[in-house]
Image: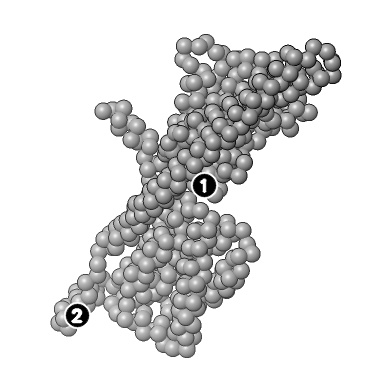
Amino acid sequence: MQLLRWELLRRLPALLTVPAPDRARLEGLIRNVERNVLLPVKAVVAQVLCYYFYFSNWFDDVTRTKRPMIEALPQDVVLARIRSFFLIYVVLNAVVAALLIGMSRLPLRWAQRTACLSSILDSLFLGSLAFVTGGFNSILFWVFLALIVRNAITHPQARFQLTLNFAVTASFLVAGSLEAISRRIEPSLVDSTIRLAIEQGGAETAEPVILRIFLLLLVTVCCYALQILLERQRRAEEESHEHALRQEQLEATGRLAAEIAHQLKNPLGIINNAAYTLQKTVKEGKTITQQIAIIREEVDKSDRIITELLGYARLSEGHVERLDIAGELDYAILQVFPQGAKYQTCIHRDYSSALPTMLAQRGHITEIFVNLLQNAREAMDGRGNIWITAQYDEGYTVLVTIRDDGPGVPPDKVTRIFEPYFTTKPKGTGLGLSIVKANAELYNGTVKVESSLGEGTLFTVKLPAKTLINFRK
């Protein structure tokens, strides 16, 4: 039971993390919500506030209505500060509007940070208005709730959404606190004021401050929790569709590979038999014998390629599964470094806590990691260090690096390391790394190598967790 609780606590950050949306969806959220909806609304609100601040007695009416029983700060001082902040708010929002209108020409991270800046400005300005309209009892409290919902829609990532929404709550708390501090209640007037309010039947009952703050925090948490549920539901539907599509494509390519192998093996067998008979019959003619030997050698090589193709056909008979990359790496480590073996190799693991699930055949992914780890082990003769990292990368992809401190690869051979039948080992077949490359590209992934003599070798594998299988090869 204790182990179960510890495992639950360890996985809690991953369970509460909303996977980052893809680039197109995030860009669409910012464009549709921040630019197409909020910019026109904020332009209208700015015009209305400009009228009330500069061409009406709204400020005097508000302060008299909200502070009939207290001596307030000098109104002209407060009004001057609010007007100055309003002008700054309008200028900064004009800059934000220009950036959002031209967001198609900017990097996505700039557009995202511009949207964050817009939200922070709205929180601060809303807090200043709440300060002069009643503090904790301001009617603008409900606008704070709307601002929290807006942040939840526009900023799906946890670090942006929660930070901005807690900033909204902090703005309301600071505005209410400053409004309460700014009041100087006359004790001698309290009894008469209460009595007057009772006589008039208009005593104002303010909502408890703690309840309002709790409501802001509750909406923040509920919005994030609802987003987690909706995002996981959307991911599950997409994975289900992609699972069926990948399985169908793998079965199709398996049947195609088997058919090609069957069609090629028969003529190759006939050619091989004919060449053998011809070589046995012809006793003289050295040149002819050499050419026949070349034919047989090429036939053998073609037969090995076809056999490998049949191996791929058998491999495609498996099933597409939801794979945990961290778990697959641990499984590959156990395959290459079994507990019974006494390899003097130290494995250093660094896995991100929120890796996306990958839809793939387990055999394809396992073969990538096993071949890379085995390559590192053989390069170091079983003695040394291997560093393995797995982290989330842009575009809903997983980035895996495997680095060793072995002897490295000569510069003239690094560029050929993924070629079939090319090897730097005396007993190597030259197929391991070519299979790694083929399996990675099967899922539209990439594999890169960096190496220098005496400084070890680094393999970087990038695997899209959400992609269609590539059968162009």
Crowd band around label 1 with a 10 angstrom C-alpha radius: few (<14), some (14–19), many (20+): some
**Which residue is identified by label 1?**
468
Residue 434 locus on image (x, y percent): 64, 30
Type of amino acid under label 1: Leu
One can see residue 76 in this view: no
Residue 329 locus on image (x, y percent): 49, 29
Image quadrant occupied by the C terminus: top right
Question: How many numbered markers are drawn?
Answer: 2
Up the image or down, 46 lies above or below 374; here it is: below
Q: Nearer the viewer, residue 135 or 97?
A: 97
Residue 284 locus on image (x, y percent): 83, 13
Residue shown at the point (42%, 46%) measured from the top left: 244
* Colouring chosen for the image of the structure: one colour
User: Helix, strand, or loop for circle 1?
Assistant: loop
Q: Quadrant of residue 217?
A: bottom left
**Which residue is identified by label 2?**
202
Horizontally, residue 363 falls left or right of residue 228, namely right
* Disc sitting over residue 308 in the figure: none
Crowd band around label 2 with a 10 angstrom C-alpha radius: few (<14), some (14–19), many (20+): few
Q: Nearer the viewer, residue 303 or 43?
A: 303
Horizontally, residue 305 falls left or right of residue 9, namely right
One can see residue 54 in this view: yes
Horizontally, residue 362 falls left or right of residue 293, namely left
Mark 1 / mark 2, whichever is N-terminal: 2
Up the image or down, 15 lies above or below 151; here it is: above
User: Helix, strand, or loop for circle 2?
Assistant: loop
Q: Quadrant of residue 221?
A: bottom left
Residue 182 locus on image (x, y percent): 38, 69
Up the image or down, 183 lies above or below 270; here it is: below
Q: Quadrant of residue 459?
A: top right
Type of amino acid under label 2: Gly
Residue shown at the point (48%, 68%) measured from the top left: 32
